[in-house]
């Protein structure tokens, strides 16, 4: 695993070694880290696998360690696009869902349209991250690949909600038909 980390760190360093042009600043990344994810192992997994990649790439990283449920939503309510160039959710599926909910509730359309959300999969199941990166990848590679995707600025749009109304319509229709049947029969 050390050789794997070393390879990703060397690649990240090539991004960090590129000099900034005059008047430009490093990319600001806000990381929401849920240290309770993965049975309390998330902080160590992040610090050992993802953080070195982000720092070596020359990013200005602000880590917000969550302490309670709902904190990510509260923070997203007040953060502005001038404060960050990207959000990283480092935790499990619950942390990601909370961030997406806070993101979608945000009234600032410019923020929603310009600030990307990255995922560092630190939970036990990581269902959404498995959809994005594949399910047959081992933990260290999974985390390093996710961090490098942020460094490279890899972006892809995903639908975060699906509403299947056909079942609801069918259920209401059957209730209505049942009512008509009862009404006619009696």
Image (cartoon, rainbow, N blue to C red):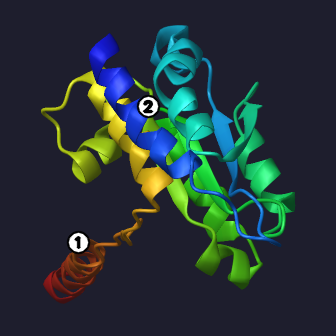
The picture quadrant where one finds residue 167 is: bottom left
- Quadrant holding the N terminus: top left
The picture quadrant where one finds residue 38 is: top left
Secondary structure of residue under mark 2: helix
Mark 2 neighbour density, 10 Å: few (under 14) some (14–19) many (20 or more): many
- Cα separation, mark 2 vs mark 1, equals 49 Å
Task: Give the residue pinned by disc 1.
Answer: 167
Q: Residue at x 70, y 33 (%)?
A: 69
Q: Nearer the viewer, residue 165 or 105?
A: 105
Question: Percent from the top left, x then y, of residue 113?
Answer: 60, 80
Q: Is residue 77 left or right of residue 109?
A: right
Q: Which mark is on residue 9?
A: 2
Residue 97 appears in the rendering:
no
Q: Nearer the viewer, residue 163 or 102?
A: 102
Q: Is residue 153 left or right of residue 166?
A: right
- Asked if 137 appears above or below 118 in the picture, the reply is above
Q: Nearer the viewer, mark 2 or mark 1?
A: 2
Question: Percent from the top left, x then y, of residue 9?
Answer: 44, 31
Question: Percent from the top left, x then y, of residue 99?
Answer: 61, 51
């Amino acid at each position: 695993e050390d050789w794997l980390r070393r390879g990703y760190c060397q690649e990240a360093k090539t991004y960090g070694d590129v000099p900034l042009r005059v008047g430009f600043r490093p990319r600001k990344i806000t990381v929401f880290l849920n240290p309770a994810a993965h049975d309390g192992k998330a902080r160590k997994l992040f610090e050992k696998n993802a953080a070195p990649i982000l720092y070596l790439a020359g990013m200005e990283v602000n880590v917000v360690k969550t302490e309670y449920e709902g904190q990510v939503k509260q923070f997203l309510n007040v953060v502005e696009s001038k404060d960050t160039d990207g959000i990283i959710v480092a935790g499990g599926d619950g942390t990601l869902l909370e961030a997406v909910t806070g993101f979608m509730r945000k009234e600032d359309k410019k923020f929603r349209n310009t600030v990307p959300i990255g995922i560092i999969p630190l939970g036990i199941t990581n269902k959404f991250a498995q959809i994005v990166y594949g399910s047959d990848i081992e933990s260290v590679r999974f985390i390093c690949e996710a961090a490098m995707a942020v460094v490279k600025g890899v972006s892809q749009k995903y639908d975060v909600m699906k509403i299947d109304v056909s079942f609801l319509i069918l259920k209401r229709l059957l209730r209505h038909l049942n009512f008509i049947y009862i009404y006619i029969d009696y």
